[in-house]
Amino acid sequence: MREIILAKYGEIALKGLNKHTFEDMLVKNVKRRLKKFGQFEYFRAQSTLYIQPEDENIDMDLVMEAMEKIFGIAKLCRAVEVEKDFGKIAEKGIEYVSEALEDADTFKVEAKRADKRFPMKSPEICSRLGEIILERFPHLTVDVKNPNVTVTVEIREKGAYIHAVKVDGAGGMPVGSSGRAMLLLSGGIDSPVAGYMMAKRGVHLCAVHFESPPYTSERARMKVEKLASIMARYCGQIKFFCVPFTEIQEKIRENCSEEYFTIIMRRLMMRVAQRLCGENDISALVTGESIAQVASQTMAAMVCTDAVCKMPVFRPVIGMDKKEIIEISRKIGTFETSIEPYEDCCTVFTPKHPKTKPILENVEAEEEKYDFSELVDKAVHETRIYNIDAC
Ligand code: ATP
Ligand code: MG
């Protein structure tokens, strides 16, 4: 029994003249993601990508699991391929969808006859196949408006495909079709979700993580790498920038007034992150900030942070409650890792009374007490860069 996967495009299908650019990107992403499972043949027709394994031993359950995480796909069907002969379609096709039919009360048959040389027309295929199904599964009745199961027969150039089960794809746009952004990735719950949301809209993500050894441990960094590898199931391989941040944090503590620690630290994170963007063709920053969640996430604090940024800072979870963010983090599989109790550089030297409504001139005056430019250069220079693949 030869199976094939039908991946139906989401928003790409609505694109105009540039549709093929998005399609090409999607196909490239799918190929890259499925390479580890074996060889596949790919072809496209009518806003659908057909993916056929060339080797019978490929584990199609795992392939489907991977496919469900690829952005740009609205629906996925796993179908059986049979010869373009009605007898075979009825015999093998019905056998393939029998489980779905057994569990249903109502059904209908849909036929798509792309290969016009096939001798039967679509309505005839539907009615004859419907009759055979009713004979084999007497508990079923036909419901053309709202059936439990729709058995679809597609007669294409290369063969006939029969399927009955559609699952939701990841939606969104193909990763890479909306430019490149740098995600500030901590070990928390919010930033992986923020990254996921940007990737869903087609943004290719890189990630920067600030660590402050010995205040933060190697385990803490490994946790963040684990988060990146879970995210990579959706986003594809992530270029990871690990910035040594200890000296900068120590100089802030030595030179600036305590209530400004966090805001100055965040401005320095942005300065370093931007420099890394400039060197890596990245045009925006992404954070997991949500307004009013903590002292550093007030509107006034964000105004002060953004004042050092020369590129847009996207905050896709800005208007979400923690509960909503957690829901997504559970769905994408990062939650359990995010809640592991390791320290973050943000929790090192936290002020007792941080300024919740900092005024930019005061922040700048505080920051000018020490010239951080050399340390920023040094942090950029000493950043370790490596790629993280999906786990
Ligand atoms: P998260 O759950 O994402 O850690 P948070 O609610 O803990 O967020 P903060 O610690 O104030 O919030 O951090 C706000 C944002 O700053 C994070 O969402 C992340 O984008 C960025 N950030 C914080 N710490 C780091 C870090 N060590 N490295 C990189 N980015 C960081
Ligand atoms: Mg955090």
Image (cartoon, rainbow, N blue to C red):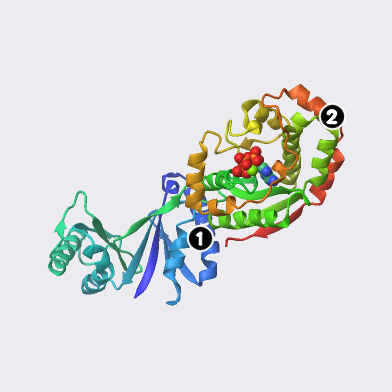
Q: In which quarter of the image is ligand 2?
A: top right
**Image location (x, y in percent) of residue 73:** 44, 53
In the rendered view, tell whether residue 366 sits above or below residue 48. Answer: above
Mark 1, other Cα within 10 Å: few <14 / some 14–19 / many ≥20: many
Quick check: 234 left or right of 386?
A: left
Q: Which residue bears the numbered disc 2? A: 368
Say if mark 1 contacts mark 2, CB within 8 Å. no
**Image location (x, y in percent) of residue 366:** 81, 27
Q: Which residue bears the numbered disc 1? A: 30
Mark 2, other Cα within 10 Å: few <14 / some 14–19 / many ≥20: few
Quick check: 180 left or right of 115?
A: right
Quick check: 264 left or right of 169?
A: right
Residue 375, can we see it?
A: yes
Q: Quadrant of residue 100?
A: bottom left
Residue ID at (65%, 47%): 186
The answer to which of 41 and 282 lies nearer the viewer is 282
Q: Does the residue labelled 2 lie within 8 Å of ligand 1?
A: no
User: Is the C terminus in the top left, top right, bottom left or bottom right quadrant?
Assistant: bottom right
**Image location (x, y in percent) of residue 43:** 43, 63
Q: Give the amino acid at mark 2.
A: Glu
**Residue depth check, mark 1 versus mark 2: number of the one nearer the observer:** 2
Q: What element carries label 2?
A: loop
Quick check: 232 left or right of 127?
A: right
Q: Give the amino acid at mark 1.
A: Val
User: Is the N terminus in the top left, top right, bottom left or bottom right quadrant?
Assistant: bottom left
In the rendered view, tell whether residue 109 sits above or below residue 370. Answer: below
Q: What element carries label 1?
A: helix
